[in-house]
Each structure stands twice: as C-alpha cells, then as structure tokens.
Amino acid sequence: MDFTIRAVRPEEYEELGDLTALTYLNDGLLLHGEDDFYLAVLRDTARRARESEVLVAVDAEGRVIGGVTFALGGTPWADIAVVGEAEFRMLVVAPAARGRGVGEALVRACADRARAVPGCARLVLSTADVMAAAHRIYERLGFVRTPERDWAPVPGHLLRTYSLELSAR
C-alpha cells in the first residue's frame, strides 16, 4: 500500500473539503450542480472534524488522495445510523488515485473503528444508485443491501443503503 489512512489534520481541512466537493460535483452526485447548497457542507471539513471523525488517505508525498466521515448513531453526522450503529459518509477518492484500493482501505478503517466502539453492532451507509464501483467494494467487504432503510434526503433523490454486521469478519 503506497498510502496511509489516518485522522485528518487541520492543515488538510481545505484540501479534503475541496476534494470532497469536487468529487460530488464531477461525479454528478449533486442535484443542482455548482449551485447546490450541499457544496458548502461538503467543503466544511473543520465542522465535520469537530462533530465526528474524519479520516484521510495520504500518499507518500503527504497529499490527500481520499477521505471519509465516520459518525456514531444518534450524532449530528449520522443520517441513518441509530444508537448502537456507526455510519460513514462522504467517501471520496481523488480521480488520479482510483483503482489503488484507497476507497476500500477507507471503508475497512471505518469498519475497524466501528468494531472498536463498545456496543456498536453494525456499520451502515447511504449511497447513490450511480456509484456502482463503490457498491462493488461494499459487497466485497460483506455489506448487504437494506432496501427497507432506503431514503430520500430531498424529494426525488433516493439513496440506497447497506449494512455490515460487525460480528461478521
């Protein structure tokens, strides 16, 4: 592995915020393009780091090549996780780093983090239908579809959900 996964540092907040916003924009994950209100949320890594855990993948030169937000159920950054669960959101990998296992390593880091939380039974996530490569990662790691939890953050934007039972390895 030619990259490291660790907690984001304050000097990386802007870089990760830009990567997150540009990834959502360029991958067509925003409903209103550059006018989408969610872009400001995606860019605000400092807030996410204060209110949840933010992990980054950095290459050998120290450049941020990926990131993810990890939240416990019942906290502000958990969209679908309830108490006794954990969730990850905003999983992004820089286009130049795709295909190197960065996304999978970030997901594995979230699963390891969730397993370390006493009483945490599962790790959950929401994803857009168009994220087929991410779906393959989730399924390879043992996540299963939970269509009963699918939801729409805004009308017309359905997100599919997955869950990983943490007793399963």
Image (cartoon, helix red, strand yellow):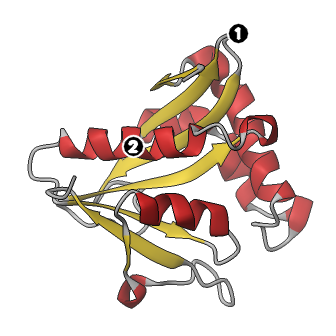
> Which residue occupies 64% across, 27% down?
13
- Which residue type carries mark 2? Arg
Q: In the figure, residue 31 lies in which quadrant?
A: bottom right
Q: Is 77 positioned to the left or the right of 33 in the image?
A: left
- Horizontal arrangement in the rendering, residue 162 relative to residue 101 (left or right): left
Q: Which residue is mark 1?
A: 61
Of the residues shown, which amino acid type is indicated by label 1? Answer: Glu
Q: Which residue is under mark 2?
A: 108
Secondary structure of residue under mark 1:
loop
The label shown at residue 89 is: none
Q: Where's residue 5, x and y in %?
A: 49, 26
Q: Name which quarter of the figure residue 2 lies in.
A: top right
x, y percent for residue 94: 75, 39
Reply above or below: 39 against 142: above
Q: Nearer the viewer, residue 76 or 117?
A: 117
Which residue is at a point 75% across and 66% down the rendered structure image? 29
* Image location (x, y in percent) of residue 101: 58, 40
- Residue at x 28%, y 40% (from the top left corner): 112
Q: What residue is at 44 percent from the left and 66 percent from the top?
A: 139
Q: Quadrant of the N terminus?
A: top right
Foreground pick, 142 / 12: 142
Q: Is residue 137 above or below residue 108?
A: below
Q: Secondary structure at mark 2?
A: helix
Q: With respect to residue 139, does 17 lie above or below?
A: above
Instruction: Measuring from the top left, give residue 107's x and y in whole percent.
Output: 45, 47
| Crowd band around label 1 with a 10 angstrom C-alpha radius: few (<14), some (14–19), many (20+) | few
- Residue sticking out furthest to the left: 119
For marks 1 and 2 on the same chain, the one whose residue lies earlier in the sequence: 1
